[in-house]
Image (spheres, rainbow, N blue to C red):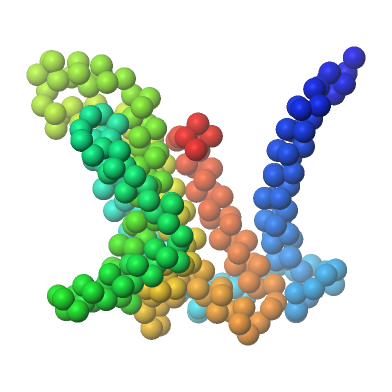
């Protein structure tokens, strides 16, 4: 009897659902990459021919170049800040029992639960209130946008670091302390090297979360400053050629590389 014949009907149903989900996720991505090579000047099916010229046009447009640079700058800054905040938070949550621990963990993870447009609006109103009370401008500044994107990155960084700490035997740290090392020395010489893969993956995943954000950026960017997702939306208002698909393909490629590198350090399937 073949393996297929031995499968229980419920197993068949499960496998069908899995493959249908994979198909539902991958087909739009594959279609985006495919259409990016169409020679059609207006997006339409079937393809009149194939060309890679749209990628060259995407690289020559100032809006996309400046949008990419701003998105990259903000994503790098946000991921680094998120790791700086996430490391002590993850150690406190994973290693210590204290009153309010679950509440703090929930607060730090809340950006995943709140709709992005609602969070963006709340941050915008908060920035306006800060400017009114202290005359410090955060709206329409790179610094304000970076701080807002840090909130996006923190939950992912925290989750990866807690997962890394859960795989680290506390006895190793206790042995270091019992041999006379201070807590600071133990952190830098024992804990930090052990969770370095999680930190690296946290930086990369924080970068991914920030780089692809649209909703918060829409409310917080200033005149003359747009992120790559906003540049793509603006382009679609006036043109419908495959250039936008070429930009999307480049963006997907960057995120895919970051995900592959992240999975190299921390097996994401065991974390999420």
Depth check: give the residue in front, 26 or 65: 26
> Could you tell whether 272 is left or right of 141 in the image?
right
Residue 144 appears anywhere in the view = yes
Could you say which is closer to the camera, residue 192 or residue 90? 90
Residue 41: x %, y % from top left: 75, 79
| Residue 150 pos. (x, y %) | 34, 57
Residue at image point 84% right, 18% down: 6
Instruction: Please state if 40 lies on the left or on the right of 232 as rendered.
Output: right
253 vs 196: above or below: below
Query: In the picture shown, does residue 250 fall above or below 243?
Result: above
What residue is drawn where x is 27% and y is 21%?
170
Rendered image quadrant of residue 222: bottom left
Q: Residue 131 sits in which quadrant?
A: bottom left
- Residue lying at 50% horizontally and 73% vertically, measured from the top left: 230
Q: Report whether 222 appears left or right of 27.
A: left
Q: Where residue 242 sits: x, y (%)?
A: 69, 72
Task: Let me know if residue 68 appears in the view.
Answer: no
| Quadrant in which residue 119 is drawn | bottom left
Indicate the quadrant containing the N terminus: top left, top right, bottom left or bottom right.
Answer: top right
Return the x and y of residue 134 as percentages of the image width and height.
Answer: 14, 75
Q: Residue at x 51, y 69 (%)?
A: 229
């Amino acid at each position: 009897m073949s393996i297929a014949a031995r499968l229980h009907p419920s197993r068949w149903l499960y496998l069908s659902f899995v493959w249908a989900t994979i198909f539902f996720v991958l087909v739009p991505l594959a279609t985006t990459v495919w259409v990016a090579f169409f020679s059609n000047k207006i997006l339409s099916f079937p393809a009149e021919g194939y060309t890679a010229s749209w990628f060259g046009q995407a690289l020559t447009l100032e809006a996309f170049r400046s949008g990419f640079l701003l998105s990259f700058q903000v994503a790098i800054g946000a991921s680094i800040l998120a790791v700086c905040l996430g490391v002590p938070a993850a150690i406190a949550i994973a290693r210590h029992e204290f009153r309010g621990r679950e509440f703090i963990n929930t607060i730090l993870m809340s950006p995943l639960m709140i709709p992005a447009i609602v969070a963006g609006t709340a941050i915008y109103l908060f920035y306006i209130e800060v400017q009114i009370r202290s005359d410090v401008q955060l709206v329409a500044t790179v610094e304000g946008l970076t701080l807002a994107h840090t909130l996006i990155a923190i939950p992912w960084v925290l989750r990866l670091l807690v997962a890394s700490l859960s795989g680290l035997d506390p006895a190793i740290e206790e042995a270091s302390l019992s041999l006379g090392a201070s807590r600071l020395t133990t952190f830098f010489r024992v804990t930090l090297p052990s969770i370095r893969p999680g930190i690296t993956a946290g930086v990369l995943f924080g970068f991914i979360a920030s780089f692809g954000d649209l909703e918060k950026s829409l409310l917080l960017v200033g005149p003359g400053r747009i992120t790559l997702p906003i540049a793509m939306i603006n382009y679609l208002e006036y043109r419908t050629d495959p250039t936008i698909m070429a930009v999307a393909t480049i963006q997907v490629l960057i995120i895919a590389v970051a995900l592959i590198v992240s999975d190299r350090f921390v097996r994401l399937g065991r974390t999420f």
